[in-house]
Image (cartoon, rainbow, N blue to C red):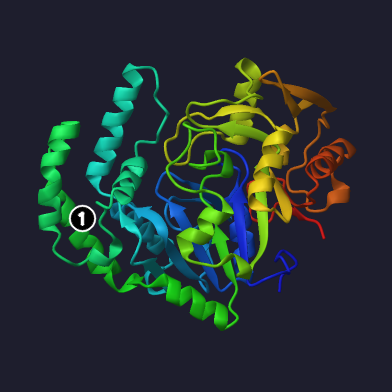
Amino acid sequence: MSPLAPSSGSVTAVIGAQWGDEGKGKLIDLLAEDYDVVARACGGANAGHTIVVGGKKHVFRLLPSGCLHTHAEIILGAGMVIHLPTLLEEIALLRDAGIDIVPRLRISCEAHILFEFHKEIDGVLEERRSKTGTDIGTTRRGIGPAYMDKAARMGIRMERLGHDISEELRKRAHDLQTCYGITLNAKRELKQLHEAAAILKDCVTDTIDLLHEHMQAGKRILIEGAQATLLDIDHGTYPYVTSSSTTIAGALQGLGIPPKVLGDVIGVAKAYCTRVGAGDFLTEVQGETAERLRERGGEYGSVTKRPRRCGWLHIPDLRRSAMINGFACWNITKLDVLDTETVIPVGTEEKNGKAVMKEFVGWKTATVGITAFDQLPKQAQELILFIAKETGIPVRYIGTGQGREEMIVRS
């Protein structure tokens, strides 16, 4: 077993602690070598994970980033809403790269299908909110409307793939026109389903039975969290959140795994912070500082390409995420983005709706590619140790660049 792999339990989870885009995909990619199964539980194609291997960038929206490891079985759980054309596109891109994932892909029969009309509803709703100044900044990928259908017991699940759903679509047509002014393109929806069924029908199965068989056989399972805790529908910065549960509890629910089998939960946070869309961001910065962080960190949405709002780390956010998820350790990512900063502020508490900041002296030297903690500049070490002390959780993984190998692992 690699020294990267956590030691406790057969099930390990990687969960974002901020507003997403923390760099979870890189840690998943590193850990996946030591796991038999990589599973994604919730969300849809609004989540984007970017992996850089051998200088080549891979972006995943539905498939977990651990799928680059060809030994691992890949599971898409019941908590997901799956846009089939996007999934087929990802499968095709992997095939072009010499990786055929279909033989080892398993999709929950309970997962919901996200249709083109869900994306159209998303656009209509956001336009309506925009007119009243209450827009959320949704990715317009149809995630919210798909979960609305699921909650209303109107959704169509993956178990229907390969079946004739013309009647279900016919029943939706009137509602779409009346409520949203949308004309249902049933021919397009059915064509996409037919194309997906030709490739994926044999991948659809009862993944709860499958996962429990794997656990009974002693296989190791890695859960890849999508988005992050502060976007959770219950515990995030409501209403500026996503439509699913992004915590470890949501991941277990989405996969049908009981809490008693869970080993380590690893929290992932950037050494600074970003956010996409509207909502509070107490440590946000503007102007030249924001632009510098954005450009050095490549802070543009992997799905939407929108520029991300940038700011500083906020310790109370990490503490809250840790309370909710029970993190065993941290992965602090993108430390190298701070290499040029003269002063590095960190939010330590909140008073009267504002962040109280503590300033750290910048190290003003390159940390890119460093793989040993004692080789980091003293000031960088102090920042990492401060995060561990203030949260009460050790920092085990430290990202020092985009590449797969640019990671410090502490025992």
Q: Where is residue 264 in the image (x, y as percent from the top left)?
A: 68, 62
User: Which residue extends farthest front?
Assistant: 152
What's under tag 1, amino acid-wise? Gln
User: Count of labels shown?
Assistant: 1
Residue at the image position 50 percent from the left and 64 percent from the top: 39
Residue at the image position 81 percent from the left and 39 percent from the top: 390
Task: Decide: is 191 above or below 10.
Answer: above
Q: Position of residue 31 (x, y in %)?
A: 64, 63
Which secondary structure lies at badge 1? helix
Task: Decide: is 67 above or below 27.
Answer: below
Task: Decide: is 68 above or below 244.
Answer: below
Q: Position of residue 100 (x, y in %)?
A: 40, 69
- On-image quarter of the C terminus: bottom right
**Residue 344 in view here:** yes
Instruction: Tell whether 286 sits left or right of 153.
Output: right
- On-image quarter of the N terminus: bottom right
Residue at the image position 13 percent from the left and 33 percent from the top: 178
**Residue 342 in view here:** no
Instruction: Tell whether 61 sits left or right of 3.
Output: left
Which residue is tagged 1? Answer: 192
Judging depth in this view, the residue of 65 and 82 nearest the camera is 82
Q: Residues within 10 Å of mark 1 (few under 14, many from 20)?
A: some
* Image quadrant assignment for residue 106: bottom left
